[in-house]
Image: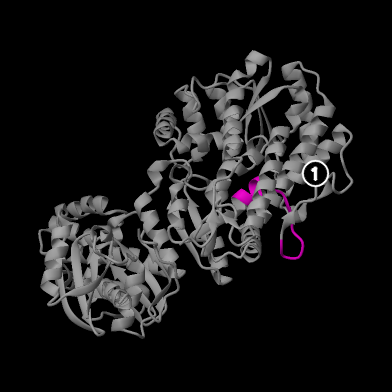
Amino acid sequence: MPKYKTGPLKCWNKAKELRQKYYEDYVSAPKSGALRIGGSAWAFSAVPEGLGDVRWLTGEPYGASCAFDRKFSLSCLEAAEKKGYARDLCAYMRNYWGSILIDQYAFGGGFPKPDFFWTSHICCSHAKWYQVAGELEGGTPCYAVDVSVGPYTQITPHGVAYVVGQLQDGIAWMEKLTKRRYDDARLIEAVITETEAMSLWAKICMLNRNVPAPLDEKTMYALYVFGVIMKHRPEVLALYRELHDEVKERVERGIAACANESKRLISDTQPPWGFLDVFRHMETYGAVSIGSLYTFGLAGMWDFPDGTMVPKATPRQLGQTPRTREEALEAIVRWTLCRPEYQHFYNPGLKTDLMMRIIRDWKVDGALLHYNRGCEGLSLGIAQNRMELAAAGVPVSVFEGNMGDEREFDHARTLERIDSFLETLGLRKVEV
Amino acid sequence: MLSCGIDVGARTVKVVVLENGRIRGRAIRVAGLQVEDDVAAALKEAAAGEVRTIVATGSGREAVKEARQRPTGITCAARGIHFLLPEARMVIDVGAEEGRAIQCEGGRALNFAVNEKCAAGAGTFIETMSRTLEIAVDGFGPLALQSTKLVPMNAQCAVFAESEVVSLIHEKTPKQDIARAVCDAMAGRIGSMCRRLAITPPVALVGGVAKNTAFVRALENDLKTDLTIPPDAEYVSAIGAALIAAEEH
């Protein structure tokens, strides 16, 4: 007899269609006179919106999409290695480069080259990713923004001005490159939309404080991604409004993501995208992963009062709605530099602190950390996180893998390790 | 009333039968391709009477169709060591396929570490080296104990270590020194894994590799602590499984 009622999300198909459309729109952009832009999902994507109709292909989610199709991913990875790129580099980046090299798009057809790259340097790999991609494509122009101005606790006016200045220069660069006139009203609208959408995703995550959790992490992976790939777009804000209302209703009606929820876990950063079934496997023990710093803090924006975390107040809520280009750029810079997933590039201790806030407020029983050999940036400090969580009395286990290179993931042994961990939490597999 | 624990490992099948909290029978068989037949044969050898509940563990536990539960080796080793050595606070289990360290208390696993994707910390490593050195597995430990010379070995995996051993043989390095180098290298790997957890004495060593006296000495030196090897060291996980089976009655 299941402990809780459960059921599929009503807006699931709409989300799937929107994601498919995002990748197809990028291909068809030239037909409608739109520009194609490539770059990191961490980029200030609202800014190029001032150019008019633009379509994006963000590198990390695209790399994850490649990884999800293990056969296609292997072709990409082998092509990158054959070209001479080491296999211990960022796995997203190698999938992306390989996709260019074999001239195949994960969503069908040849690889669609962008008109230019607009990106941010958030780690060593990102600093070279689009330079190399541009070279492989025969010379795609690239504009990169340096965001290394410190953690959210130490953002200074001159740090903000430094990043805003780069965006101002970037707008001039885009105008010159595309010969398009920049529309500040579109920028302002995109900034407002982005802040509303990311705060709303945080609000959706808040609903997962409920026991039973209305969403599980595997489902969240398919939904958080909109707050990454097209966070500034009105269709995402509309989807998140619908999703929020539906998840709120699930809470009110006691509908669970996992019918036998007994223990609540969190993970930390990127999962092994080709092996998301590990999350369903945990549910056979009555364990549900209710999220992660990754799903909460990449697409969601938060304020951090008194050891907790709450959805970040938007410029509109604060009565600071931007009205000029300068105000819009400053608003989006201040907003973006507080992104939780930025913070452990500066100090793993900040990540532990944020995870502890989730563990306390979301009633979490244990943490499962991914020693992700495919991402130097976000793997840095995970061993420290493990020790700090354990010292705080949180049951914690690790598994080795790679977010985007299936050759570095041992499926059977990872499941065995997860089983052992869940048994130490007092759970037992439901034998069928 | 008989309850039975079956540990289907990579190399052997171990069966323990309990009656009223006491070991009534046990058997060990080499695990072949037809593991169901090996399980049936071991069960027949160990059990004189009708077994009421079976619990299976080990990497091949899914092969035991009659099992009421299939807990992991971590859980069963913690239960088993509590039965044999209640005072143990850490158990190091080195079998053919895997090495693992478990902090435990009262029969429960509190925390654990497992050797990574590599056989250099498992019994298969010693088996492979025995073949290369053309000596019996049982004689590997006693031979290594005769060594008076440290030979460094940088092996990162069992396959590459074999090449390294072949090189040492070509250099006319005495077999006992090579055997010791193998035990030291393996103890170094297991010791490193254990230190990811805190070393919490009393520490028990179980699993088939606990029979290798040179490895035991090397691991004690590496961990700087004494190791207690219980009787029935190979059967600890099967005992744990049998205890869980007894609770199912």
- Please state, as top left, top right, bottom left or bottom right, where the N terminus of chain A lies in the image: bottom left
Where residue A363 appears, as percent x and y from the top left, is: 61, 65
* Vertical relation: A86 (above or below) B14: above
Q: Quadrant of residue A321?
A: top right
Residue visible at 46% across and 59% down in the picture: A398
Where residue B112 appears, as percent x and y from the top left, is: 41, 68
Instruction: Please name the residue that numbered disc 1 is placed on.
Output: A160
- Identify the element where label 1 is drawn: helix
Where residue A93 appears, as percent x and y from the top left, is: 52, 35
Q: Quadrant of residue B148?
A: bottom left
A406 vs A9, nearest the viewer: A9
Residue A406 shown left or right of residue A19 in the figure: left
* Vertical relation: B16 (above or below) B189: below
Protein chain holding label 1: A
Residue visible at 28% across and 56% down in the picture: B119
Query: Is residue A273 visible in the rendered structure shown here?
Result: yes
Magenta stretch in the rendered image: A295-308
Where residue A242 appears, as percent x and y from the top left, is: 69, 42
